[in-house]
Amino acid sequence: MTQPNNKHTIVAPSLLSADFAQAGQQVKDLQNAGATHLHLDVMDGSFVPDITFGHKLIADIAKNTTLTLDTHLMVDNPYHMLENFALAGSDIITVHAEARGITHLHRTIMKIRELGKKAGIALNPATHESTIEYLMPHLDLILIMTVNPGYGGQKFIPEMMDKVRNVSNMIGSRNILLEVDGGVNANNATDLRNAGANMLVAGNYVFSGDYRQRIASLMGEA
Ligand code: DX5
Ligand code: ZN
């Protein structure tokens, strides 16, 4: 059975909702407001239509923060980029199961671990969790997309709640983070934690209010 995990919920505010021109200050403010993690959405204009930023911005942020850096690669052909994102200071690197050029998903995950980083796989809303069944022993994190990737501020897809529950059951007692990304806010955070999610990404919700209060409310503390 899935156990609610209120005590250990990690909140990872997403830099995507920040003002990039003020990124350094906003990251400091998040840290002062109690954030421990920062979610970094890398978009390449191919896997998703928009382009955000690359490893240089992550390296510059890494120099000035102690936050755990959670890099979400929404890119095609991620393999050849892994080293740059590792060297930049990412602590977690997550690739999409659906990315073009990721035929060798197992090899990609092993490469992230060889680089000394936590390895994650993200699943789009339409992708069945069975895709990653045989990779479970090698994963540090599974990211369930609860919107279609590419933009902040979209509406949570309610059917994804069952998927979170299913993946939580697949994880069982394994030491794998279960991260949820897209449309997370105070209205669905409790259900997500109860379904087994222990890492919540939030862009618009955190950035459209008081950071400390919003982070605490996602953790179930306010
Ligand atoms: C969407 C990104 C998300 C985004 C979430 O493709 O992967 O990380 O920043 O933003 P909100 O919380 O506003 O849905
Ligand atoms: Zn993301």
Image (spheres, grey):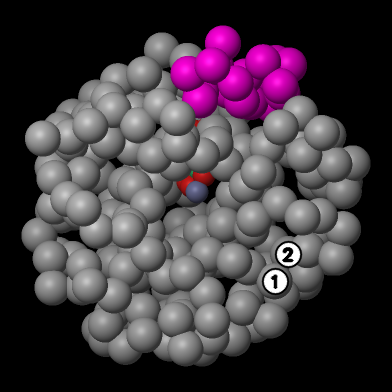
Frontmost of labels 1 and 2 is 1
Quarter the N terminus occupies: top left
Q: Position of residue 210 (x, y in %)?
A: 73, 16
Residue at the location (44% across, 64% down)? 94
User: 77 or 93, which is in the foreground?
Assistant: 93
Quadrant of residue 216 within the rendered picture: top right
Residue 213 falls within the magenta-colored stretch: yes
Report the disc number at residue 89.
1
Is 28 colored magenta in this rendering? no
Question: At 36% from the left edge and 79% from the top edge, which residue is drawn?
Answer: 109
Within the image, what quadrant is residue 14 found in?
top right
Residue 70 at what x, y percent from top left?
57, 57
Q: SS of the residue at dot 1?
A: loop
Label disc, if present, on residue 60 of the rendered structure: none
Looking at the image, residue 48 sits to the left or right of residue 24; the answer is left
On residue 58, which mark appears?
A: 2
Q: Main secondary structure of the magenta part?
A: helix
Q: Can residue 4 be seen?
A: yes
Q: Residues within 10 Å of mark 1 (few under 14, many from 20)?
A: many
Q: Give the residues drawn in magenta, as a range.
A: 205-222
At 37% from the left edge and 64% from the top edge, which residue is drawn? Answer: 140
Residue type, numbered disc 1: Gly
Q: Quadrant of residue 157?
A: top left
Give whichever of discs 1 and 2 has the lower sequence position: 2
Find out whether the residues at labels 1 and 2 contact each other: C-beta distance under 8 Å.
yes
Q: Which element is circle 2 on?
A: helix
Q: Which residue does the image show at 36% across and 18% down from the upper left?
A: 190
Depicted 63 relative to depicted 81: above or below: above
Q: Is residue 204 above or below residue 120?
A: above
Quarter of the figure that contains the C terminus = top right
Residue 30, image x, y percentages: 76, 35
Viewer can see residue 151 = no
